[in-house]
Every structure is written in structure tokens, then in C-alpha cells.
Amino acid sequence: MLSKETLSLAAIALTFVAFIPYIRSIFNQHTKPHVFSWLIWSITTFIVFFAQLDDGAGVGAWPTGVSACITSFVAYLAYLKKADISISKTDSLFFVAAIASLILWYFTSEPLSAVVVLTLIDTLGFAPTFRKVYDQPYQEDRAFYALIALRNIIAISALEHFSATTVLFPAVIAFSCSLLLVLITYRRHRLSA
């Protein structure tokens, strides 16, 4: 049986395996990520990382922390490369809600309430990318989302403490990435038919 540290390192390795080609694709202008989705995801992932640590996730939180750092870099690249900088009122609402979750955690002193809100926000943060993928399915990389889904499944296995606070976020992200992968594949098939 693999140790929690080994599972965590495997999840971190998958994070880099997923993100390096994705970042390279951004530089080559093949992938044009939605800047606000990535900004929302970076904020929510950082907060969830700290909530997981607070609830005893241990080494199982490491992949979330690494992902938060890399996700912030992708948001920066999306802005820098002017990939997809369209910001709707809904996008702005998601951003404000992500920031508000910090206030919620502060006042409740309960990381689960923040994780529930952040998981909802992060999931809603997929909306601009789902919208973009529906119209332009070739601007996102299917392998990336498959690897991130797998990474989150492995990260759950690496958790030192299983609770709603530690498991909810990576489980929902794995599901959301899988759903996005299905949409990308479906739309590419429909457009090529």
C-alpha cells in the first residue's frame, strides 16, 4: 500500500504533468484560458488549501497548495496574453463571492462553511469556461482536464483526515473537470461532423 506522502507526491507530479503542457499551449496561443475563471479558481484553491490544513488534511493538502500557486500563474498568463479577458456581471459576482467566503470563515471560525461556499463558487467559476468551450472547444486541452480529475482523485487518497472539509473540494473539482472533458469532446465531435 502506498504511503500518504507517496500519494501526495504523485498528485503533485500529475499537477505538473497537466500544467506544463497547458502553460506551454498558452504561450503558443493554442489555449486561451478565461482569465476570470482562473482568477476565481486561484483564490478559491488557496482558501481551500488553508481550510484543509486547518482541518488536519496533512500531506493530502499539498497538491491543493501547489495547484493554487500554478493556477495563479495561469490566471496571470491569461491576463498577460489577453487570452479571454471578457468579464460578465456573473463573473464579477463569482469573484466577489470568493472574496466574501474569507469573511464567512473569519466570522464562523468554521472551515467547512468556507469550503462549502468556495466549492460552490469554484464550480460556478467553471461557467465562463463551459460557455467558452461550447463555442470554441478547440481552445481548451482535453488531456489537461483529464489529468486534473485524476490528480484530485489521488489527492483525496492522500488525505490524512477525511471529512467534508477535506474531501468536498477535490471531489467536486474531479467531477467538474470530467464534465468539462465530456463537453469538449462532444462539441469537437459535433463541429467536425
Image (cartoon, rainbow, N blue to C red):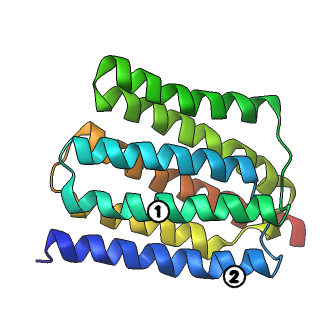
Residue that protrudes farthest toward the left in the picture: 1
* Residue 187 in view (yes/no): no
| Residue at (19, 72) in percent of width and height | 5
The residue drawn where x is 15% and y is 56% is 160
The reply to whether dot 1 and dot 2 touch (C-beta < 8 Å) is no
Q: Few, some or many C-alpha atoms within 10 Å of disc 2 (few <14, some 14-19, many ≥20)?
A: few
Question: Which mark, by number, is residue 24?
Answer: 2
Q: Residues within 10 Å of mark 1 (few under 14, many from 20)?
A: many
Quadrant assignment for the N terminus: bottom left
**Dot 2: what SS?**
helix
Q: Residue at x 35, y 71 (%)?
A: 11
- Which quarter of the figure has residue 74? bottom right
Picture residue at 21% right of the left edge, 41% below the top: 55
Q: Is residue 100 above or below residue 50?
A: above
Tag shown at residue 67: 1
- Residue 89: percent from the left, percent from the top? 80, 29
Disc 2 residue type (three-letter): Arg
Vertically, is 185 above or below 174? below
| 89 with respect to 125 (left or right) | right
Q: Amino acid at mark 1?
A: Ser
Q: Is residue 24 above or below residue 5?
A: below
